[in-house]
Image (cartoon, rainbow, N blue to C red):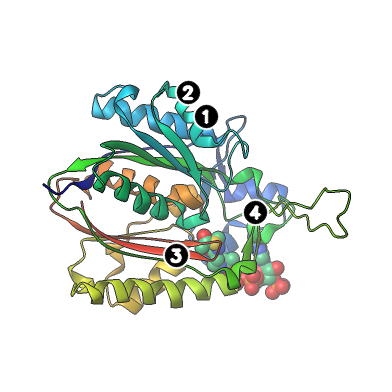
């Protein structure tokens, strides 16, 4: 019999410290009106001493507790992040050690704000192969360490947090269709973590570790390319946009969601949003949103709802997934 994958549990965690737009206005030349009118963001969670793996471990612990299973029952852990504690060990390896999942294989996946969708896409194939039965897929970021706090054009946009899912095998299909894309030619529009060459033979040294963004170009990319991919995916499946129960999209900016909803001809209430209180948490934004939607009863995880999930960001990367949740 064919094996499928399904999301059986969701969880999220955000650091305790909340920084409002007014708090930011105390340390840089900005104000609540500018930030909230252009982005919808009013506050964000920022770590004090926690690392990305600490946030991801909190999510992993919650997922196991909710499922009522031990760490020895899972087969793999994938953490999507652009802000790992270190390149090695990976954030996922740290989570594995923290929860004592000694038998799993674990690795990080780097695809910026599309990271969770790409990780879920990969994990679904691992489960559908029949080789693995259960896996944790987590998006976790401490973007506050990647932000140049002297650059107001980016510093106000991001936040820290983590969210994730337990994926397990199922007799019925839940992942209906997907389209994932990358366009490295446009990658310079949003960069982070450029490292210089330290070889003694190097004649050049690009080195700018912080987030740099061409805001207008990224805005247009989201509205044009991502909406086209979503519409194309729905068309290919013969699914009308207004028959989707919810669009769970990367939480970068409320104006992006408004414009996408309009282009797709769908009421914006079908686009749940939480960037108001989290800011843009990159790979963590979709799983945090999904977890909140389950908590507040919008999404039931009983297989009765059709959901369109889409991430988009650095790379450039973007992806859309049609799910039965
Ligand atoms: N506070 C006050 N003023 C500011 C701030 C700030 N934090 N940042 C920039 N400004 C000023 C600029 O200096 C500029 O002033 P000037 O006209 O005197 O030069 C003015 O505001 C307008 O700046 P723009 O960059 O043109 O502002 P824009 O209207 O394009 O909005 C924004 C910027 C919000 C980033 C917008 O381009 C956008 O939404 N882009 C989408 C990209 C995004 O959300 N990226 C998130 C990461 S990528 C992702 O997740 C997909």
In front: label 1 or label 4: 1
Residue corresponding to mark 3: 318
Residue corresponding to mark 2: 98
**Does the CB distance between marks 2 and 4 fall below 8 Å?**
no
**Image vertical order of residue 114 relative to residue 171, above or below:** below
Q: Would you say residue 16 is visible in this rendering?
A: no
The crowding category of the residue bearing disc 4, from other C-alpha atoms within 10 Å (few below 14, some 14 to 19, many at least 20), is some
- Looking at the image, which is closer to me, 201 or 156? 201
SS type, badge 4: helix
Compared across the picture, whether 111 is left or right of 249 comes to: right
Q: Is the distance from the Cβ of mark 3 to the nearest ligand 1 atom less than 8 Å?
A: no
Residue 315, percent from left and from top: 55, 63
Ligand 1 positioned in quadrant: bottom right
The disc label shown at residue 155, or none: 4
Residue corresponding to mark 1: 94
Residue 27, percent from left and from top: 71, 47
């Amino acid at each position: 019999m064919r094996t499928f994958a399904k999301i059986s549990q969701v969880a999220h965690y955000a650091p305790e410290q909340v920084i409002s737009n007014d708090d930011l206005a105390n340390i840089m030349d900005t104000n609540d009106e500018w930030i909230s009118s252009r982005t919808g963001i009013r506050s964000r969670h920022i770590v004090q001493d926690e690392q990305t793996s600490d946030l991801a471990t909190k999510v992993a612990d919650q997922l196991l507790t909710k499922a009522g299973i031990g760490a020895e029952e899972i087969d793999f852990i994938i953490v999507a992040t652009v802000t790992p504690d270190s390149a090695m060990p990976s954030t996922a390896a740290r989570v594995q050690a923290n929860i004592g999942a000694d038998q799993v294989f674990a690795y990080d996946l780097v695809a910026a704000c599309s990271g969770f969708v790409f990780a879920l896409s990969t994990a679904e194939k691992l489960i559908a192969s029949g080789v693995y039965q259960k896996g944790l897929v987590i998006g976790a970021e401490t973007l506050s360490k990647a932000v140049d706090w002297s650059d107001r054009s980016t510093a106000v946009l991001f936040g820290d947090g983590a969210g994730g899912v337990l994926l397990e095998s199922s007799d019925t299909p839940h992942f209906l269709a997907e389209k994932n894309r990358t366009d490295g030619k446009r990658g310079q529009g949003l960069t982070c973590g450029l490292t210089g060459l330290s070889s003694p033979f190097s004649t050049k040294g690009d080195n700018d570790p912080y987030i740099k963004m061409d805001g207008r170009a990224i805005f247009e990319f989201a509205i044009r390319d991502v909406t086209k991919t979503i519409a194309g995916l729905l068309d290919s499946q013969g699914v009308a946009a207004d028959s989707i129960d919810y669009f769970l999209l990367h939480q970068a900016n409320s104006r992006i969601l408004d414009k996408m909803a309009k282009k797709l001809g769908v009421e914006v209430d079908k686009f749940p949003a939480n960037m108001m209180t989290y800011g843009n948490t990159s790979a963590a934004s979709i799983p945090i949103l999904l977890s909140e939607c389950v908590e507040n009863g919008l999404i039931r995880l009983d297989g009765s709802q059709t959901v369109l999930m889409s991430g988009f960001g650095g790379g450039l990367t973007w992806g859309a997934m049609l799910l039965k949740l």
